[in-house]
């Protein structure tokens, strides 16, 4: 019996060390994960503000000097296209024309009436914790489950592996006025 008791204690000790080691690993990887610098995403976006909403196909390209965010119909017709550099942002809206401003956030707010933090969205789309994020929670595999930033809550519904990295597949982003749902079906890293 004494050997059985020691074996039980040893098993509990090993289980405790494995659990402690795993929980330690789960809290670190995403804060130190470097953002991808070159990527393209295709998928769908749904936006709900109060009783109004829309959904569209999405193409999003990010490079160090420029990002392009395009919404288009199922038949490929561009509904809106935002191109943003460090110096200038340009927003094309079908049947309305092109607008310019100092940031994409500003143009989307002024022209579309949507208060969407694009500067944060490029990190959230990659499943990366950004400075200023609060109440982050991780899944068992170390991927980001939820985070809060200012009045926004980001919930990661699922991930897929692309280029050897877990990247978000379905994300819901909400605040008191707006709900965004992103379904990211195709990731392409451009390294």
Image: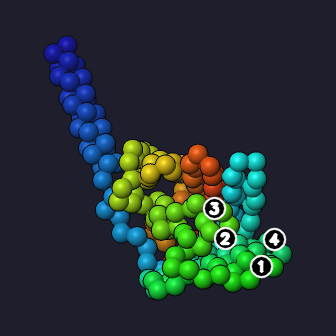
164 relative position to 22: left or right: right
> Is the C-beta separation of discs 3 and 2 under 8 Å?
no
Q: Residue furthest top?
A: 1
Return the residue at label 2. Answer: 111
Element type at mark 2: helix
Crowding at label 2, few (<14), some or many (≥20) Cα neighbours within 10 Å? few
Q: Secondary structure at mark 3?
A: loop
**Within the image, what quadrant is residue 8 found in?**
top left
Q: Of the residues tagged 4 and 2, which is closer to the observer?
A: 2
Q: Which residue is mark 4?
A: 74
Tell me if mark 3 has few (under 14), some (14-19) or many (20+) residues whose alpha carbon lies within 10 angstroms of its own. some
Identify the mark nearer the N-term, 4 or 3.
4
Calculate the distance from the C-alpha at mark 4 to the C-alpha at mark 3. Answer: 22 Å
The answer to whether residue 182 is visible is yes
In terms of secondary structure, where does tag 1 sit?
loop
> Of label 4 and label 2, which has the lower sequence position?
4
Give the spatial CA distance, label 3 vs label 2. 8 Å
Look at mark 3 in the image and give the residue it sits on. 114
Dots 4, 3 in contact, CB < 8 A:
no
Of residues 94 and 32, the one drawn nearer to the viewer in this rendering: 94
Q: Residues under labels 1 and 3: Cα distance?
A: 17 Å
Please name whichever residue, 1 or 33, is drawn nearer the observer in this view of the structure: 33
Q: Which residue is mark 1?
A: 96
* x 47%, y 64%: residue: 120
């Amino acid at each position: 019996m004494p050997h059985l008791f020691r074996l039980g204690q040893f098993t509990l000790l090993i289980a405790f060390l494995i659990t402690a080691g795993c929980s330690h690993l789960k809290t670190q990887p995403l804060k130190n994960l470097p953002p991808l610098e070159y990527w393209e995403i295709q998928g769908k976006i749904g936006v709900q503000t109060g009783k109004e909403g829309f959904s569209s196909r999405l193409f999003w390209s990010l490079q160090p000097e420029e990002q392009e965010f395009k919404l288009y119909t199922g038949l490929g017709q561009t509904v809106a296209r935002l191109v943003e550099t460090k110096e200038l942002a340009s927003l094309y809206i079908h049947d309305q024309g092109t607008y310019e401003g100092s940031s994409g956030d500003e143009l989307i707010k002024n022209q579309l009436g949507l208060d969407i933090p694009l500067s944060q969205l490029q990190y959230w789309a990659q499943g990366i914790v950004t400075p200023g994020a609060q109440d982050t929670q991780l899944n068992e595999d170390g991927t980001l489950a939820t985070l809060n930033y200012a009045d926004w809550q980001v919930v990661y519904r699922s991930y897929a592996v692309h280029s050897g990295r877990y990247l978000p597949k379905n994300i819901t982003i909400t605040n008191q006025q707006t709900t965004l749902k992103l379904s990211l079906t195709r990731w392409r890293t451009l390294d």
